Image: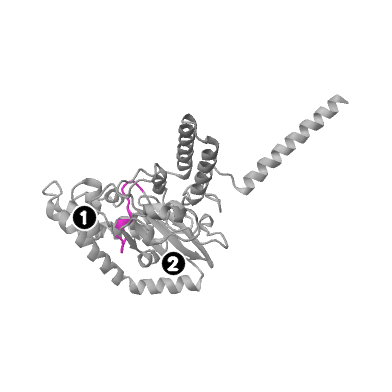
Amino acid sequence: DYYKTLGLSFNATEEEIRRQYHSIVRTLHPDRRRPSSGGGEGLERFHQVQSAWRCLSDPTRRLLYDLRNFGRSSLNSQTGAVDEVAEARLVAMQIEQAKRDVNNMEVQLQKVLRRERAARGVIIKKALYGDLRLHKDSVEECLSGSRTIEADDLVGPVLEVSGPLQCLVEQHTIVLPGGSSASKADLPGFYNPTPLNAEVELSLYVLYEFKGMLHEVLVGDRETLSLPYRRHVVPPGKVPRGPFTPSNVAHLRGGGAPPSAPTKRPSAGASAAAALAVQARRRTQSVAASGGNAAHLALRNAVQAYNLRRLYPPVAGAVGRCQGTDPEEPSRTEFLLVTGAALGALFAAMWWATGRHD
């Protein structure tokens, strides 16, 4: 809750928000904190306050935030409900506000780009925000992995937000805290392209360069975005995958779900892989019951599930894994350790059995 983050009431005025923000940020800013004063927690708190300020200090973003999370606007709190005038002006307001944001951040954008290029830091190559599900006609071609998924392949609407996201780079990193009430639409230069349709699942895809290497990551609208990470690296010799959301699994059910009927996306790579396995097993059992070639279908479903699993976006909790996207998948080091321990136990058992026999 952005109001609780700043210690404010729902009906706080713009002046009260401004005073409270400056009061908090004086003690939390990284340049003002002592090196020994709990760096990790203080930095996280600083980013939370910054996110709340970016949203509540702007009337358009605050209106959208209120409608999405509370069903009424603090800017029209005397009515106690969302009036039709506020809803009608919302779309036009947020588009105009996003344009102003982009124009106002042009100087900052060039400054950040010069700094990051000089240090070979984070350079945003592409950032897409919106409904990133694939068109039904594009699923098969994009599953092959022969090319990068482009904006034209997506259901949309989709916003290009490379500039606004680049301006959020601080000390060669980006940290956008997530949460149940957080949304990327609250960021400067962003907006919700479908503000009155709660059924659309918004996502953010980022293709960026760090230390001369391409990286890519996809997060849900309310998930934390943190970069750079090694697990985001595009393997050498491979093309970037592009925006592939777990919602695309719906296209494989009975010939594909229509774009207008989104399904609930899995919360993590592990649950998504399990869902795919269940789908494959059900299809195999159905064909077996009808006397079809179950073995052939099982093999085809297994290959399809494996290909999909490789396409899932990096999982936020899979720290330290460079290639895998499944948090249950062992890294190379873990595999070698387990294999070595098993071989050691086997040799010990053989030696003990041989000595006892002698």
Residue most toward the top? 357
Colour mode of the rendering: one colour
Q: Nearer the viewer, residue 320 or 137?
A: 137
Q: Amino acid at mark 1?
A: Leu
State the image coordinates of residue 133 (x, y, percent, origin top left).
37, 52
Mark 1–mark 2 Cα distance, whole angstroms, equals: 31 Å
State the image coordinates of residue 152 (x, y, percent, origin top left).
37, 61
Q: Main secondary structure of the magenta part?
A: loop
Q: Is residue 42 visible?
A: no
- Identify which residue is drawn at 54% across, 39% down: 296
Q: What label does residue 125 carry, if any?
A: 2
Callout 1 crowding tier (Cα within 10 Å): few <14, some 14–19, many ≥20: many
Residue most toward the front? 291
Residue 85, located in which quarter of the rendered image? bottom left
- Span of residues in magenta: 179-190
Q: Is residue 264 magenta?
A: no
State the image coordinates of residue 266 (x, y, percent, origin top left).
41, 43
Residue 159, located in which quarter of the rendered image? bottom left
Q: Is residue 300 left or right of residue 108?
A: right
Q: Amino acid at mark 2?
A: Lys
Residue 160, located in which quarter of the rendered image? bottom left
Q: Is residue 272 visible?
A: yes
Q: Is residue 282 left or right of residue 24?
A: right
